[in-house]
Image (tube, rainbow, N blue to C red):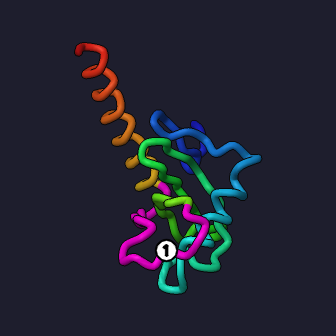
Amino acid sequence: MGDSRTLKILDPWTMTYVEYEQEFIEELQREIGPEHPLYRRDVFAIAVRRDPDAVIFQTVDGEIYAIIHLTWSGRRETAVGMPMSELLENRQAVGQRITADHAEWLEQCKRLRDD
């Protein structure tokens, strides 16, 4: 059996290219403030979604998983709820979200094909 901690990344999510991961982390830290659970935490990007522009981040200690919709403004977001963030309970919840998004993505592809 495979490692149960291994996530299967499915469309519309994709693996983060190592050479760009630091850019995602730096933009996250620019956009969030002290009230955000990822503020000043060591994180890495697990996966990226192009539509909408979202990134799944995990703290290095594995305590926090979050989907963050980066605005790419290059500065602290001051509007309430920005950048849009969704905390996920654990690694299993991340996998479930990726699987659910994949099923939805497949349905959209079928509708486009059938139109």
Residue type (three-letter) at the residue carrying disc 1: Glu
Give residue 73's quadrant in the image: bottom right
For the N terminus, the quadrant is top right
Judged from the image, the secondary structure of the residue bearing numbered disc 1 is loop
Which residue position is annotated with label 1?
77
- The answer to which of 8 and 85 lies nearer the viewer is 85
Q: Position of residue 50 (x, y in %)?
A: 49, 42
In the image, is 90 to the left or to the right of 42?
A: left
- The answer to which of 88 and 70 lies nearer the viewer is 70
In the image, is 49 to the left or to the right of 97?
A: right
For the C terminus, the quadrant is top left
Please state the extent of the stretch shown in magenta in the rendering: 73-91
Principal SS element in the magenta part?
loop
Farthest-out residue, right: 19
| 78 in magenta | yes
Q: Position of residue 84 (x, y in %)?
A: 40, 65
Which residue corresponds to the image point at 54% horizontal and 45% vertical from the top-left?
Answer: 7
Which residue corresponds to the image point at 24% horizontal and 13% vertical from the top-left?
Answer: 114
* 1 relative to 21, above or below: above
